[in-house]
């Protein structure tokens, strides 16, 4: 958004110094809770927002099982506070909410349309669904404008957790065998974060036919975890062998693949093919990620 | 529950002195938030509960529109706190959660089965639905046991708000004409609170085939608002005429009638017919409700 000439201000939990914030394109960054005090502080300094990107919330299925109330607070309470602030102070802002394919749950095979049954399998997924429902409620009763983008498997430089991080960390340790949980046949719809940012900006600026909508933020291309592991090993130029435990993790679906019809309707093009994205990740990891 | 020999302890917002609490069958009453501190205080004094009845939450569609964040806090945050406490301290308790027919929304005609589409029309209804979903999430991930009872139009002695209270208050003022909002043709499924209490106790003690379930707490008999008004006027022995504005209130469905199949399967009998319930309400109002 900053590169398109917009002034970007943010609030959330993250210790960024002003130089780091500037590098990320942020004119202002408040390290704190998404609450009325911080939102009003930003508005007092810089005026009311025309677009609000809501990316705050829980970010781990595993943590949501270990500490469900914390995941609830991060995802649900922050959303309720944000909606209440928008209702009171900036009801004509466009709200772009980042949700997750986890709302679909584990019972789907093949591409999942936005209209599919919503059967989350973890507190993480349930709380994202509750978040969407609160948004819908505020749109219905208070004239808020909101688009929900359900992201699938986002990866990219700077991501210091999840599958790609774990694999690269172990490749750096030069393990002879890479033992991973699950079966390796789990299908995911991988998208590079740089494309995802472009998609969110496009959603924010596009034509909104309705005051509420949901879009799958996925590519429509499914690739297995085993193939991701092999590709990373290849880019690393390693001889490591991959082994899977064969046991799925609780709440971990066998397939999460987007029906990407709505993204296609927007004429959005995913520019970073998986091959390049994985190569870039390995390159970032080798040059920037510290042991 | 108290009359069946159970010790009943409660927590919630309500200034009851010990004598009042005793009259209601409560051995202990904590006037405060449904939170870990108060729940643990009860458990320390009296041991862990075998049954938990969760009736806390918002209780007015109108207030939920005027102050949605307050309704959210009352209904959703209290439920999240209770579930977290149960998960941590009493996961084998049976949880009986009181929800509302408002989760069905306004698009239904005729008896509504529990499997009907859930399309709430107000923050009140959305928050009740979110409450149910949080319960389902904790059942799925943490082995909580929960039955949700969706109540319809509950009335009875001591209810100092809503339609019956409003009508009786105006009959006492000896108004010549009773002007009511809506069309008068709105259909509701009226149940006397004394029967509802018996139903909740039956649900608590009955056989639970699953760890999560939903039951319509309705009679399956639909009666219009106009008929309720006429019946109250008759019991009051008044000559007042009723007029309706003809304009529905926002979020107010034209019909909310229970498919009562599950209650019938339990062999539960509603003992207080509407005629007697309304007569009792008028009698209570005339002898106890102060102007």
Image: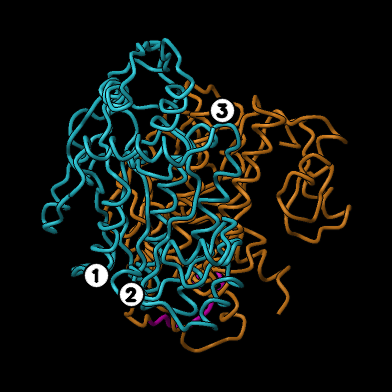
Chain colours: A cyan, B orange
Q: Is residue A137 left or right of residue A32?
A: left
- Do pointers 2 and 1 mark residues of a single chain? no
- Is residue A121 shown above or below A242? below
Per the rendered image, the range of residues in magenta is B233-243
Per the image, the residue denoted by label 1 is A205
Q: Is residue B200 left or right of residue B274?
A: right
Asked whether A187 or A193 is in front, the reply is A193
Q: Position of residue A209 (x, y in %)?
A: 18, 68
- In this rendering, does residue B107 appear at all? yes
Q: CA distance from mark 2 to mark 1?
A: 43 Å
SS for callout 1: helix
Q: Position of residue A100 (x, y in %)?
A: 36, 44
Q: Residues within 10 Å of mark 2 (few under 14, many from 20)?
A: some
- Do pointers 3 and 1 mark residues of a single chain? no
Per the image, the residue denoted by label 2 is B183
The subunit carrying tag 3 is B
Mark before the other along the chain sequence, 2 or 3: 3
- Is residue B146 shown above or below B160? above
Q: Position of residue A142 (x, y in %)?
A: 40, 73
- Is residue A77 shown above or below A128? below
Mark toward the viewer: 2 or 1:
1
The subunit carrying tag 2 is B
SS for callout 3: helix
């Amino acid at each position: 958004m900053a590169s398109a000439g917009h002034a970007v201000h943010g609030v959330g939990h993250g210790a960024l110094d002003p130089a780091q914030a500037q590098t990320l394109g942020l004119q202002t960054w408040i390290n704190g809770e998404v609450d009325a005090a911080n939102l009003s502080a930003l508005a007092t300094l810089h005026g009311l927002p025309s677009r609000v990107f809501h990316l705050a919330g829980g970010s781990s299925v595993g943590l949501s099982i270990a500490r469900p109330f914390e995941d609830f607070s991060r995802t649900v309470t922050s959303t309720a506070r944000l909606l209440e602030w928008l209702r009171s102070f900036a009801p004509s802002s466009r709200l772009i909410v980042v949700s997750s394919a986890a709302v679909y749950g584990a019972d789907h095979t093949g591409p999942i349309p936005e209209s599919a049954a919503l059967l989350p399998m973890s507190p993480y997924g349930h709380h994202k669904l509750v978040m969407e429902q609160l948004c819908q409620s505020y749109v219905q009763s208070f004239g808020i404008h909101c688009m929900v983008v359900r992201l699938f498997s986002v990866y990219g430089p700077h991501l210091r957790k999840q599958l790609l991080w774990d694999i690269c960390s172990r490749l750096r340790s030069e393990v002879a065998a890479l033992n991973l949980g699950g079966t390796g046949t789990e299908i995911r719809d991988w998208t590079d974060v740089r494309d995802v940012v472009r998609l969110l900006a496009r959603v924010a600026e596009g034509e909104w036919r309705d005051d509420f909508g949901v879009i799958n933020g996925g590519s429509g291309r499914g690739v297995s975890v085993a193939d991701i592991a092999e590709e990373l090993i290849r880019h690393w130029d390693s001889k490591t062998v991959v082994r899977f435990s064969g046991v799925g993790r609780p709440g971990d679906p066998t397939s999460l693949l987007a029906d990407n019809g709505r993204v296609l309707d927007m004429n959005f093009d995913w520019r970073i093919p998986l091959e390049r994205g994985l190569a870039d990740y390995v390159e970032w990891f080798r040059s920037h990620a510290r042991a």
